[in-house]
Amino acid sequence: MSFYVYLILGFLGGIPAGMGMGGGTVTIPLLVLLGGVEQKIAQSANLFAFLPMSVGALKTHAQNGLLETDGIWWTIVPALALSALGATIAGVLPSEVLRKSFGVFLIGLSFVGFYQSMQARTQE
């Protein structure tokens, strides 16, 4: 892929990442489908890019008074442990299985979002 394609992917993934919506939800499928990057490589590249993006987004959210830290360690500690487990599983699974699992996850996520928007609409 060319420098410009990577740059465009950075723009497309950076905005939802900064909003806390998961830049990988955009970046990973684009890397795989448009860039021809193997699923495992796309996911690890996304994790690597996530580190500086999250620092910038966290700083901005803190400046805007949107950082809530009550109980955050109850989320961070198990997330760290289970993310290591998830990375181990991802390393063992074939890329095709990982790609299909990611697709099923995105489809499920879209159904949840659709259901929640319909619930909100009926409550108005």
Image (tube, rainbow, N blue to C red):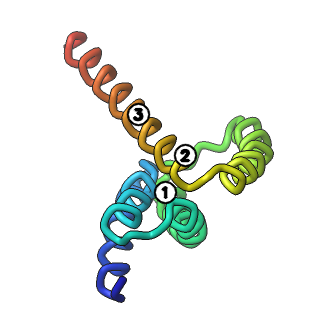
Q: Is residue 71 above or below residue 89?
A: above
Q: Picture coordinates of residue 110 (x, y %)?
A: 34, 33
Q: Residue 97, labelled with which disc?
A: 2
Q: Which image quadrant: the N terminus?
A: bottom left
Give the mark, 2 or 1, whose residue is nearer the N terminus: 1
Which is more N-terminal, label 2 or label 3? 2
- Residue 16 relative to residue 57: left or right: left
As drawn, the label of residue 109 is 3
81 or 31: nearer the eye? 31
Give the amino acid at mark 3. Leu
Provide the secondary structure element on which disc 3 rests: helix
Q: Quadrant of the C terminus?
A: top left
Residue 61, disc: 1
> Residue drawn at (37%, 56%), measured in percent from left and top?
26
**CA separation, marks 3 and 2?**
18 Å
Which numbered mark, 3 or 2, is in the foreground of this view? Answer: 2
Does the image show residue 55? no
Crowding around mark 2 (Cα neighbors within 10 Å: few <14, some 14 to 19, many 20+) is: few
The residues tagged by marks 2 and 1 sit, at their Cα atoms, a distance apart of: 36 Å
Residue 45, x across and y down, in percent = 55, 70
- Residue at 68% in and 37% down: 70
Q: Nearer the viewer, residue 3 or 18?
A: 3
Secondary element at image label 2? helix
Amino acid on which the number 2 mark rests in the picture: Val
Q: Is residue 87 visible?
A: yes
Residue 23 bears which disc, if any?
Answer: none
Q: Are marks 1 and 3 in contact (CB under 8 Å)?
A: no
Q: Position of residue 12 (x, y in %)?
A: 31, 65
In the image, taking residue 20 as reference, residue 9 lies left or right, namely: left
